[in-house]
Image (spheres, rainbow, N blue to C red):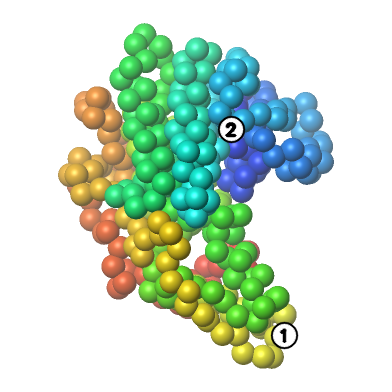
Amino acid sequence: MYTGKRILIIGGTGTIGQQMVKELLAYNPKVIRVFSRDEYKQYEMENEYREYHKQLRFLIGDVRDYTRVQRAMENIDYVFHLAAMKHVPACEYNPFEAVQTNVIGTQNVIQAAMQAGVKKVLFTSTDKAISPTNTYGATKLTAERLISAAEYMKGPKSTVFSSVRFGNVMGSRGSVIPLFKKQILEKGYITVTDPNMLRYMMTPSQAISLMLKANEMAQGGEVFVLKMPIVRLGDLAKVMIEEITRKYHIQSPVEIRTIGLRPGEKRYEELMAGDETHVALETPDMYIIPSVFMSDRQYPEVIQEGTSNVFPEPSMAIKKEVLCDWLLNEGII
């Protein structure tokens, strides 16, 4: 699907973006354009992938700038839109900044993709878009709706728009895992908002493989909801303490301090809204919420209509021992 093609990764210097570049290079595309506003990260990536200098192009730009997005998208076949303001407290304190990046930026991507005749656009959303209680979730929900509606309003344009929705990506810059490690090594204690908080989590490699699969299946307007394990935050903190103290030979005990929820934070995230569960299709590794504008689509691998276990309960959290093995096997800690 990607061999000899031109690909644009918006937000390509983030954790998922870098993993996506690494994965897509294996398919020998004609060019991958890495678009972001992080000059230093681009410099680091350019050095790391020096052997691929004929296939990689690094473009400084902001998704808020329509003209720059339009220029970056010329002659592109596939677009992965990963750019976002995603830290919940930052979005709470700067709500219109989140709107400009997550909402207006996404509309810029839609408009530029239709103008450039792109084949497919895949947008990355979040489980925080479900019943949002914070600015980040609300802006991501709006962006999801823009992507789904683009399929209806594009007229004779052939660009296929779809979204993937997943939870916390372990080890990413926004993940709590690097923070826990830093606190254990530098402070001797961990701060936890609520030990009983439940989060859907996945590794960067899982996120990428399922995104590529969703993009292949996309016919237009869908939201692909990736199946993920549920992790209890208190268990994650204990595993981090056990493994980091063992790895670095720390003898003194590490305390877990509960600090309460941050502004806009939820104790439990959900994979879907209640109404979505009635129309969603289930495959072995994801749920597919079809576009409300296109209800006659057929998808491979569907095992049933309707869904279950998309609203997390404490009993669904994976065991601490399993979590520990998973993190170690993936090289997260």
Badge 2 crowding class, 10 Å Cα cut-off, few under 14, some 14 to 19, many 20 or more, is many
Is 319 on the left-hand or right-hand side of 101?
Answer: left
Q: In which quarter of the image is residue 186?
A: bottom right
Identify whether 331 is placed above or below 93.
below
| Kind of residue indicated by mark 1 | His
Q: Residue 179 at x, y = what percent?
A: 61, 66
Residue 136 visible at all: yes
**Disc 2 from disc 1: Cα separation:** 41 Å
Query: For this rendering, which residue is in front, 65 or 165?
Result: 65
Determine whether label 2 and label 1 are within 8 Å by CB.
no
Residue linked to disc 1: 249
Local SS, label 2: strand
Rendering coords of residue 325 (x, y %): 53, 72
In the rendering, which numbered label is found on residue 233? none
How many labels sit on residues? 2
* Residue at screen point 65% across, 34% down: 36
Residue 42, above or below 317: above
Q: Disc 2 residue type?
A: Ile
Q: Tell me, yes or no, if residue 318 can be seen here.
A: no
Closer to the chain start, of discs 2 and 1, is 2
Residue at the (40%, 34%) spot, across then down: 143
| Disc number placed over residue 10 in the picture, else none | 2
